Amino acid sequence: MPEYRHAARFLALDDAHSGPHAAVWLLPIAYEMTTSYVGGAKNGPLAILEASAQVELYDCAVGCEAALQYGIHTLPILHPTLESPAAAMADITAAVSALPVPEKVLVALGGEHAITPAVLRALSQHYGDLIVVQIDAHADLRDTFDGTPYSHACAMRRCLDHAPVIGLGIRSLCKEEADFALHSPHVALITAEQMHADAQKHYLDQLRQRLRGRKVYLTIDVDGLDPSVISATGTPEPGGLSWYDCLALIEAICTSGDVVAFDCVELAPTHGAHASAFAAAKLVYKTLNQIMAARGMLQK
């Protein structure tokens, strides 16, 4: 059975702007079992929650203290069983299935990227025509890794059981993944190199066309951003997205598709690297604000 432990509220919101009546429900998932390099992702959710208390509620991009208009209900931190990766995934799916979606916008905080298909599996029961948009350094398209199909390195491959995937900012993959992506009609990758070479950002127009009219699940692996923005992650890769390029991507995703849920994963907090936790917390908030602005829920 999953185990819950209480933690801080996202953005340190007061009672009037948090609780079950809020439009957004946030589930922290402190899961780490298949990490292949530097550990610590299980501590990511709490680090994001704690850092979020320092994030200003006024967001220049939307021109208001957005969270005070829609509210965020922070659930207790979920610690799924560590009996096996498969059992952990079942725990996460069960926990998400018990939440009031699609009435609420769901945010999941990881934890390692393996949580994404488990969350998606629960959501796919409620949404048709769902598509996954992945911001990530790694393709995560291996069929198995280190003896399990539920590794963080297999996250997007498992997502394909429920929805097609568009990967953005990818800059690290093996030949198996490259070949699979090339021949699969359900995978589209826009690499970091392609994005960097596209000075006119035509990839944003391509993304908008693909997402128009679709329900979107957005998964943000923080290593998709350059280590100069977020360094505290288990598998950092050079050449990542800048802060503003990432925000432009998120705005394009939210204004063209209907983002019904998203996650932010793979923060591995380390002592003295609090800037990474703060950046992740602010990224979560700004993503939420773009979702709510696109839904017409914000007033300046």
Image: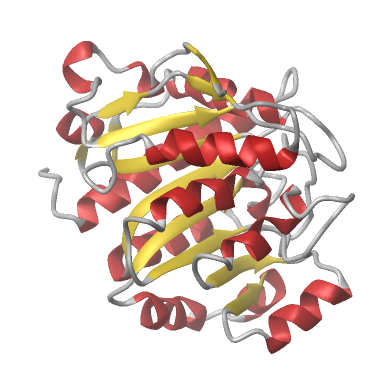
Write the residue at 10% across / 44% down.
299
Residue closest to the eye, 293 or 120: 120
Write the residue at 65% across / 54% down.
224
Write the residue at 63% across / 33% down.
276
Query: Is 180 situated above or below 127?
Result: below
In percent of width and height, residue 119 lies at 50, 46
Q: Quadrant of the N terminus?
A: top right
Does residue 29 appear to the left or right of 208 in the view shown?
A: right
Query: Is 221 situated above or below 90?
Result: below
In percent of width and height, residue 49 lies at 48, 22
In percent of width and height, residue 178 lies at 78, 78
Quadrant in the rendering for residue 149: bottom right
Q: Quadrant of the C terminus?
A: top left
The answer to whether residue 42 shows anywhere in this view is yes
| View extreme (left): residue | 299
In percent of width and height, residue 121 lies at 49, 53
